[in-house]
Image (spheres, coloured by chain):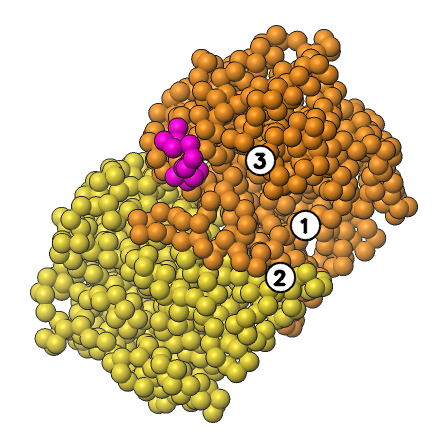
Chain colours: A yellow, B orange
Amino acid sequence: MPQDPNKPLSDIEIARQAKMQRIDAIAEKVGIPDDALEPYGKTIAKVDISAIPGLAERPDGKLILVTAINPTPAGEGKTTTTVGLGDGLNRIGKKAMICLREPSLGPCFGVKGGAAGGGYAQIVPMEQINLHFTGDFHAITSAHNLLSAMIDNHIYWGNSLGIDTRRVAWRRALDMNDRSLRQINSSLGGVSNGFPREDGFDITVASEVMAVFCLANDLADLEARLGRMIVGYTRDKKPVTAADIKAVSAMTVLLKDAIKPNLVQTLEGNPAFVHGGPFANIAHGCNSVSATKAGLKLADYVVTEAGFGADLGAEKFFDIKCRKAGLTPAAVVIVATVRALKMHGGVAKNELGKENIEALKKGLVNLGRHIENVRKFGVPAVVGINNFISDTSSEHEAIQSFCREQYGVEAVVCTHWAEGSKGTEALARQVVALAEEDHHLDGLGFRHLYPDAMPLWDKMKTIATEIYRASDIIADQKVRDQFRDIEAAGFGHLPICVAKTQYSFSTDPNLRGAPINHVVPIREVRLSAGAGFLVVVCGEIMTMPGLPKVPSAEIIRLDENGQIEGLF
Amino acid sequence: MPQDPNKPLSDIEIARQAKMQRIDAIAEKVGIPDDALEPYGKTIAKVDISAIPGLAERPDGKLILVTAINPTPAGEGKTTTTVGLGDGLNRIGKKAMICLREPSLGPCFGVKGGAAGGGYAQIVPMEQINLHFTGDFHAITSAHNLLSAMIDNHIYWGNSLGIDTRRVAWRRALDMNDRSLRQINSSLGGVSNGFPREDGFDITVASEVMAVFCLANDLADLEARLGRMIVGYTRDKKPVTAADIKAVSAMTVLLKDAIKPNLVQTLEGNPAFVHGGPFANIAHGCNSVSATKAGLKLADYVVTEAGFGADLGAEKFFDIKCRKAGLTPAAVVIVATVRALKMHGGVAKNELGKENIEALKKGLVNLGRHIENVRKFGVPAVVGINNFISDTSSEHEAIQSFCREQYGVEAVVCTHWAEGSKGTEALARQVVALAEEDHHLDGLGFRHLYPDAMPLWDKMKTIATEIYRASDIIADQKVRDQFRDIEAAGFGHLPICVAKTQYSFSTDPNLRGAPINHVVPIREVRLSAGAGFLVVVCGEIMTMPGLPKVPSAEIIRLDENGQIEGLF
C-alpha cells in the first residue's frame, strides 16, 4: 500500500518496488514442470504445453470473463480488475490464473502508456512486457511480411497464379505507429524491382496473422488457418490464398516458438499468461486460445478479458473465441466506475470529482444494458465497481441498488488499485458463488447469440438489434452483394466480427448512455478467411495509427540506473 | 565423426545429434556467474557484462582474426574454421572463446542456408541462431523504424527543423528479402497521411543502426553515436541528425537488452558469443565490439572473423573495428581451400574434383597477396587449409611450399569439418606460437594502414593501391566535391569503409587471382556519421535483396517431430 495516500506511487514505482519471484517458482504453483519452461530472463518464460505430462486428461477450470461498460475518457480499469480478481481468487484459496493480451510496441511511443494493469494490481516485469517481451509480435510481423514478399516475388517471376496486381488484398505490417506507410506505391524503380502497384502497411496487431495466431488451437491448426487466408484475387475475381503462394509452412516455422504462451506473475506472485493481442475492431480482441486453454487445464479459475466494452468485447469473446475454441464461460464481471457512469450521464470530465447522484443514475442505463446483454448469452454476471478516491459511498450505493433492484445482480466495490487482492476479496467470493452454482441463469446454460447456419446478413442484424438495440442495419447494394458473394463462396457459416466505435452502443461515438432506435450503417465487409470471421465495418477503422505532435518517444529514456523513464 | 565417410551427415543432422550443455555450464567455463546470465531457453543466454565482478581489471586475452582469400563459388569455410580453431585452442588447453556475427533472418528464406559453421565445427542451437535468436535484429529493426516514423511525423506536424522532403537520407528497414520495397512512394492518400515523398526499405543488416550497435562500447556510446546519424538535409543542405529528431533516447531503450552479447556453444561445448551482424559492404562486417571486448576479458584467446575476403574483411577489421575500439590483434589465420585456389587459377567449378597442381599454383597468387597485405598491418599470419575430401596431398604440399618459400608462413591442413577440434590441433598450436611470441613481424607491432589525419581521398587511394594494388582511383567531380564537403563538415578524421565486390581485388568480380594496374572507380560516397566511417561505393551495392524464383521459404517446414526442414 502507498505510504502516503495523498502521494500515491506511480504504477512503475510500485512495479519496481516489487520483489519478483523466479519464474520457475511461479510455474510450480500451477504444476508446470521445469522441463516445460523456456526462460526469457529470470522472470519470464514460454511454456511448452506439450511437455506437461497428462495435461489433456485434466478437467477444465472455470473461465471468468472481465468486460466493461462503454469506455469513456474517465477510464474503467478493465485490465487492472482482471489482475486484481486473479489475485483475489488466489487470496481466498482458489488456484487461479490470469490470461491477458500482449501490449503492442508501436503505440508505446505515441501517447499510450503501458498495458499491464495498474497500482497494486499489475503484472510484471512491466518494462519487458510492454517492449519486445518474448518477441511474439516480431515473429508475427516477420511471418506477415514473408508472405507479402512472396506474393510480389510470385508476381515478379511470372505470376503463374494470375494475381491481379490491382486486387492484392494482403498488405504489409510493422509494429510501429507510422502514418506515412498507410498508403504507398511499391515496386518502383524499374524492371528489377517488380511491377508497380498500390500497397500499404498495417500495424502488426491488425494483421490477420495475429488473429489466426490467437484463434489457433495448435501448430497444425495455425498452419491450416494461415493457408486459408486470402491474399488477393485474379482478374476474374477468383481468390488466391497464402497456401497457393506456398508461404504457409515457412510462416509456421517463424511462429513455432511464439505460439507457446508467455508466463509472468502479478505483483502478488500469482501466475499470468500474457499471449497474443489482436485488434478489438477488425479482429476479436482476445488473448490466444492456446493460453486460455492451457490456463484452464492448469488452474481452477482462469480470469481473462476482451477488448473494448461488453457490446464489442464480450460479444466477440462469446460468439467468436468461445464458439471457435469450444469454451464455456462460467461467469462475467462487468467493470464500471462511478466516474465513467457519470460521464455516461452527461457530466464533463473536469466535473467528475464531485458527487453527482443524479447524473450517475442517468448514466447507469449504460451498465444496465450491458448486464442485460451478457445475460442473453446465459452467463451469470456481477458488477465490479473499480473504486476511485473521489467516489462517495452514496454513489456506490446508488449503483448497488440499481443492479440489485433492476437485475438481481450484485455490484461489488473493489479497491485493488490501492490495496491489491485485499480489495477484490469480496468480488472473488461473489464470482465463485456464481461460477460454482454450476448452472446458468435460466438453466439453459451458455449459448451463442446466433447459430452458424444463420445467413450472414441476419447475423449482423441480430447483433445490431439484440446487443446494440439498433432498429435496423443498412448498406449499399454493393455491400449487400458482398454478403451474398461471400456466402456463395462457402463462408456463410462464419461468425461476424463488428468493427465500430467502442464509445457507444451506436456507431456515433458521442452517443453515450443507452441509445435506442439508431441505425447501423455498414460501410464495407472484409473476409478474414484464415481467422474465420467476417469483419463488418461500421465506421472509420484505422489500422495504422500515427504519432502525436509530441510523441512519448521524445521523453522515453534510460535513467542513470539504466531504468526506463517516460514509458508509463 | 560421420560413421560412413561416403555418406556424411548433413550439418543439421550433426547439430541435432549433439547433446547440448545447459548454458549456465558453458558460462561457468569462462567464469560468467549465474547472476550475469539472462537465459533465452536452456541453451542461449544474454550476458550482462556489468554483472561480472572485477572484469574491467582483468588483462585482455589475445585476439585472433580468421579471414580468407577472395571467395569463389567453391567455398572457403571461414566461419567453420573460426569455430574449429576455437575448439582446437580449447583442446590444447587454452581458454578460448569464439565471436561471430548473428545471421540475418531474411536471406534464410531466399537461397542461403544457415550461418553457424558446418560439419563438426558448428555453433548450436543452429535453428534458433538462424531464426529469431534473442531478437537483437528485431530490436534494431524497431529502433530504425521508430526513427523513420519520427522523421515523417516531424514533417507532418510542422517541420520546424525545415527538413527537405527530397533530401531525407534515412530509409526504412525490414529483415526480409523484399525487392518490391526497394523504392516506394510514401505518405500517399491525402492530408492525414503526410507529405508524399520518395522512400524505400533496406534489409536490417544494412541499417546504420546495425553498424552503430556493433561499434558501440556501451549504452552511452550507443546513444551518442545514434544521435550523430544524419537523417536528412534542409533545403540549404544543412544536416539534420537523429538527435535533432529527439528519437535517440527511445531508440536506446529499444536496444538496451539487445546490446548484451549472446552466449551459445560449439558442438564441443566451448563458449561462443554471437552478436551483431552488419553488412560487409556498406558497413564493416564484424560482430559487436561489446562481444569481442567481453570475450577478451573472459578468455585467453578470442577467435573472430570478418565478412568477405581479407581485402575487405581484414582491412575493415583492422582499420575500422580495431581502430575504433582500441583492439590489437595478435595473429591472423587466412583460410584457403584447394578448390577455391584452383578456381582462382582458372578451373571451372565442375572440374574442381580433379587434382590440378598447375592451376592451383596459378591461383596461389590470390593467397600470396592476402598474406602480404595482412603483414602490412604488422600482424603475423598463418594459412589454414580447410580440407575437402577431393584434395590430394600433392595439392596441400604445393600450398605449403608456396607459403613457406615465398613468405616464411606456415600453411596448416585442417580437418575440423570432419573431425572437429582434432582437425585444428595443429593450427591452434601454430596460432599460439605466433601469438605468444608477443612481438609482431618487424618489431613495430600492429598498425593501421593510414592515420586518422590523412585526407579522405588519400585514405581511399591508400587502400586501393596498397591492398587492391590498383594503379589509381577515379571519380566524377561531383564525388570529389563530396569528399571535400565531408571534410569541410568536420568528418575528415573518419576511416573509409569500401563497398565493392568481394570476388576480386579489383572492382570486376570476374578478375580472379591477383590483378594489378586496375583502376578503382568511385560511384558515390555515403556518410555514416553515427557508425563513424565514410562508405566509398565502388560498384553495384544491393541493400535490399530479392527472393529467387523458387525461394527456400517454399520448402521450409516443420516435420512431424516439430523440427525444421529446408532451412539448411
Indicate the chain on which mark 2 is placed: B
Residue B141 position, x and y percent, is 56, 48
- The residue under label 3 is B353
Which numbered disc covers residue B180?
2
Please state which of the two labelled residues, at mark 1 or mark 3, is closer to the viewer. 3
C-alpha gap between disc 3 and disc 2: 40 Å
Label 2: how many residues lie within 10 Å, few (<14), some (14-19) or many (20+)?
Answer: many
Residue A469 position, x and y percent, is 32, 84
- Residue occupying image coordinates x 61% and y 30%: B355
Amino acid tagged 3 = Gly
Compared with B311, A122 (above or below) is below
Q: Which mark sits nearer the N-terminus, 1 or 3?
A: 3
C-alpha gap between disc 2 and disc 1: 13 Å
SS label for mark 3: loop
Label the magenta part by its dominant secondary structure.
Answer: loop
Same chain for mark 1 and mark 3? The answer is yes
SS label for mark 2: helix
Asked whether residue B8 is drawn in magenta, I would say yes
- The residue under label 1 is B542
- Residue occupying image coordinates x 27% and y 79%: A452
Indicate the chain on which mark 3 is placed: B
- Residue occupying image coordinates x 32% and y 41%: A38
The N terminus of chain B - image quarter: top left
Residue placed most toward the observer, B340 or B565: B340
- Residues shaded magenta: B1-13
Dividing the picture into quarters, in which one does residue B191 lie? bottom right
- Residue occupying image coordinates x 65% and y 64%: A194
Contact between marks 3 and 2 (CB within 8 A): the answer is no
Amino acid tagged 1 = Met
Dividing the picture into quarters, in which one does residue A40 lie? top left
